[in-house]
Amino acid sequence: MNLRALAAKVVFQVLEKGISLSVALPEQQQKLTSGKDKALLAELCYGVMRHLPQLDKLVSDCMSKPMKGKQRIVHPLLLIGCYQLYFTRIPAHAAISETAEACRQLKFEGLVKVVNGVLRNLQRNEKQLPTDNETLQFNTPAWLVKRLKSAYPDTWQQVIEQSHQRPPMWLRNNALSQSREQYLTQLNELEIGASAGQSDNAILLDAAKDVALLPGFSEGTVSVQDGAAQWAATLLAPQANELILDACAAPGGKTCHLLESENSIELIAVDFDAKRLERVQQNLDRLSLKAKVIHGDAANIDSWWQGAKFDRILLDAPCSATGVIRRHPDIKWLRKQADIEALSKLQSQILDHCWQWLKPGGTLLYATCSILPEENAQQVSAFLARTQDATLAPIAQQPKSDDIGWQITPGQDNMDGFYYARLIKG
């Protein structure tokens, strides 16, 4: 099937059915054999998600009435056509003819003229990208713009701008296999440009690479993980032979990093999502690491664990994921304003429950990939107010010593948006 038709299916699944891009895209990529075609399919789908309001306005202004019923898939196809005209180097005639052919392949022969007409109209009139309101100007839903303005009064535009950049590729050196310096030397010998990140085993690539080209990847000498997420193991600082809980473990990057940093620990990795839990086991297997992987609820530990209390707990809480929009631009359209309050309630439930399972003197590291205070500093502040035996341990990297935790914003030191708070039980 024509690549644009596959792209239309992906975008339709995200916008109409609420399926994430990370699930919808690989399904359609499997239908392509060429790596170049798979990359173009990803480019079209990610591009539409990044610029959705502007593309939608341009396309809708060219149509007398919206698509209805089964024909609705043609609207995402038009967005893909529009994206090619405005944001890629694909020649206009090729973009239009291929998109029209995709309409035919999607079995809407009667709408081929409409697709042709809309895209030719856009090409001919060379309309400017619309910026009539903040949603259009920033390609971000109004509710999120409002919250970011409130949270970051001086830098909100920069935060949004960084969320639209293409993310860099970070690697995590496996300290059990070699030192970071040794791995950087191997990369250098293969002329793969890279530099050391600020946390112990972080490596930033100058340009993204296919993992198959990375030395020792399949043997587990290195993993792909953003620089911000790599601080989790450093800040939790597991010690020899401790019992540690990774409370929301999927897909397992931090689980594996904890074991790489201290291989003698007994690690319990739990997650509520059975499907995503499979990824944890796959990651452990690739790296030849061992943890006890359990399908269970971190807000009801009693139902699946009858062992001792934990020395340390990593709680990478379910969150809005607003810090990783540059990697997952569909988050902007899948998340709703009401989700934030619901997520905040869930976070506080899990936090309170995990705290009961932490030994006195133990450390709980609260983490999210959110940049919203309700899920981060406000969440931890409320927890401290209601929990007498909890104290906040400062994190050396946080800008001010009296900050509640460490908020990383998108693009800061080339990292994703992330939040950490280290809590000690008295």
Image (cartoon, rainbow, N blue to C red):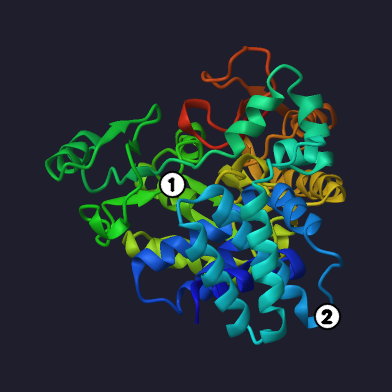
Q: Most extreme residue toward the left, as rendered?
A: 189
Identified by mark 1, the residue type is Gln
User: Relative to the observer, which residue lies in front, 356 or 351?
Assistant: 351
Residue 296 visible, this orientation: no
Sequence-first disc among 1 and 2: 2
Residue occupying image coordinates x 73% and y 68%: 75
Q: Position of residue 163 (x, y in %)?
A: 61, 38
User: Relative to the observer, which residue lies in front, 274 or 124?
Assistant: 124
Residue occupying image coordinates x 73% and y 36%: 137
Residue occupying image coordinates x 68% and y 28%: 426
Residue at numbered disc 1:
225
Marks 1, 2: nearer the viewer = 2
Q: Most extreme residue toward the top, as rendered?
A: 401
Judged left or right of residue 308, residue 132 is right
Residue at numbered disc 2:
69
In the displayed structure, would residue 209 be above or below residue 202? below
The local crowd at label 2, few if under 14, some if 14 to 19, many if 20 or more residues have their Cα within 10 Å, is few
Identified by mark 2, the residue type is Gly
Between marks 1 and 2, how big is the CA–CA gap? Answer: 41 Å
